[in-house]
């Protein structure tokens, strides 16, 4: 193995040890201000990532978090539904498409399981029909996106014509709350995934956020599952990785 690769592995190992040590020292119930050591650690981490072809352009400062594990009960009628025209000559743009989709979901009355925490994630032109918009909603818990939950409404000038639904009720959250791993540790795990798949890859991290996700992909057969906190790390090429925040 080339000396440069061995050196990088040793540096990563030392940084992970330092991250764990710092994490153990800063776990009191009363949050402490970020100190100089954490700033040095972040700087060293970003330098190691850059040496391996990964540049971070995203926010890396996050408030102290204590997060629970969630229990999700998936809806029995998840799937794809087609609808007949319900109106005529709707002047269609992003605003009217969203209004039409909002009214449609309100009329169904079946998305109150997360209360106000159903939000529009995107409004895009349909790939199948450029005269239609797709309004995609995501499910949230305490401002944290739940990766597996979404509702996508395809809107035409005659109303909502199709809905794709993968939804669940947050039935409960664990009483025990834990602190997630530091973002520096998450970035090192991200780097490990990237260079394992392609040692010559070049990535620019454009967004980092805390989300929830289940460990096994939802396939429509399970009725209940557990969602865990995860760091979502997105790159400029549109790819993203979910790094478990409880390790």
Image (spheres, rainbow, N blue to C red):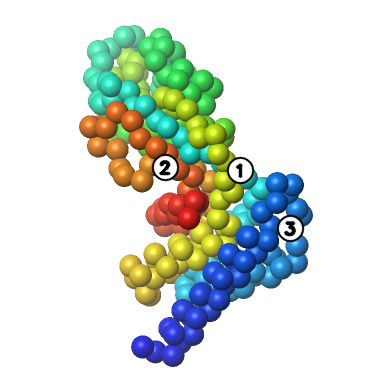
Report the disc number at residue 19: none
Front one among 92 and 183: 183
Front one among 63 and 19: 19
Q: How far apart are the alpha carbons under marks 1 and 3?
A: 16 Å
Asked if labels 3 and 1 touch by Cβ distance under 8 angstroms, the answer is no
Quarter containing the N terminus:
bottom left
Tell me where residue 37 appears, x and y as whole percent.
71, 68
In the image, which is nearer the foreground, mark 2 or mark 1?
A: 1
Q: Which residue is mark 2?
A: 213
Say few, some or many: other residues with alpha carbon within 10 Å of mark 3 (under 14 / 14 to 19 / 20 or more).
Answer: few
Q: Which residue is mark 1?
A: 66
Question: Which callout, 1 or 3, points at the residue further toward the start of the chain?
Answer: 3
Q: Which residue is mark 3?
A: 34
Question: Which callout, 2 or 1, points at the residue further toward the start of the chain?
Answer: 1
Q: Is residue 237 above or below residue 191?
A: above
Say few, some or many: other residues with alpha carbon within 10 Å of mark 2 (under 14 / 14 to 19 / 20 or more).
Answer: many
Tell me where residue 223 appears, x and y as whole percent.
29, 28
Q: Circle 2 sits in a helix, a strand or a loop, which is it?
A: strand
Q: How far apart are the alpha carbons under marks 2 and 1?
A: 16 Å
What residue is shown at x 39% (from left), y 37% (from top)? 226
Q: How far apart are the alpha carbons under marks 3 and 2?
A: 28 Å
Tell me where residue 123 appears, x and y as whole percent.
43, 33
Q: Circle 3 sits in a helix, a strand or a loop, which is it?
A: loop
Left or right of residue 117, residue 64 in this image: right
Is any atom of residue 164 visible in this view?
A: no
What residue is shown at x 26% (from left), y 26% (from top)? 79
In the image, which is nearer the foreground, mark 1 or mark 3?
A: 1
Asked if labels 2 and 3 touch by Cβ distance under 8 angstroms, the answer is no
Q: Is residue 52 above or below residue 228?
A: below
């Amino acid at each position: 193995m080339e000396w440069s690769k061995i050196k990088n592995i040793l540096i990563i190992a030392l940084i992970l040890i330092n991250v764990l040590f710092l994490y153990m020292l800063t776990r009191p119930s009363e949050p402490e201000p970020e100190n100089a050591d954490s700033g040095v650690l972040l700087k060293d981490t970003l330098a190691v990532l850059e040496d391996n072809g990964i540049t971070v352009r995203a926010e890396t400062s996050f408030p102290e978090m204590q997060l629970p594990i969630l229990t999700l009960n998936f809806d029995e009628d998840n799937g794809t539904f087609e609808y007949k025209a319900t109106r005529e000559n709707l002047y269609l743009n992003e605003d009217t498409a969203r209004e039409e989709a909002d009214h449609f979901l309100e009329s169904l009355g079946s998305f109150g399981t997360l209360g106000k925490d159903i939000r529009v994630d995107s409004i895009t032109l349909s790939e199948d029909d450029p005269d239609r918009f797709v309004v995609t909603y995501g499910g949230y818990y305490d401002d944290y996106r739940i990766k597996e939950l979404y509702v996508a409404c395809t809107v035409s000038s005659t109303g909502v014509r199709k809905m794709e639904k993968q939804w669940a009720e947050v039935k409960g959250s664990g009483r025990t709350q834990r602190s997630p791993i530091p973002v520096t540790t998450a970035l090192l795990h991200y780097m490990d995934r990237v260079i394992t798949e392609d040692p010559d890859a070049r990535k620019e991290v454009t967004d980092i956020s805390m989300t929830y996700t289940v460990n096994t992909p939802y396939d429509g057969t399970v009725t209940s599952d557990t969602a865990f906190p995860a760091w979502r790390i997105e790159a400029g090429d549109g790819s993203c990785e979910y790094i478990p925040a409880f390790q």
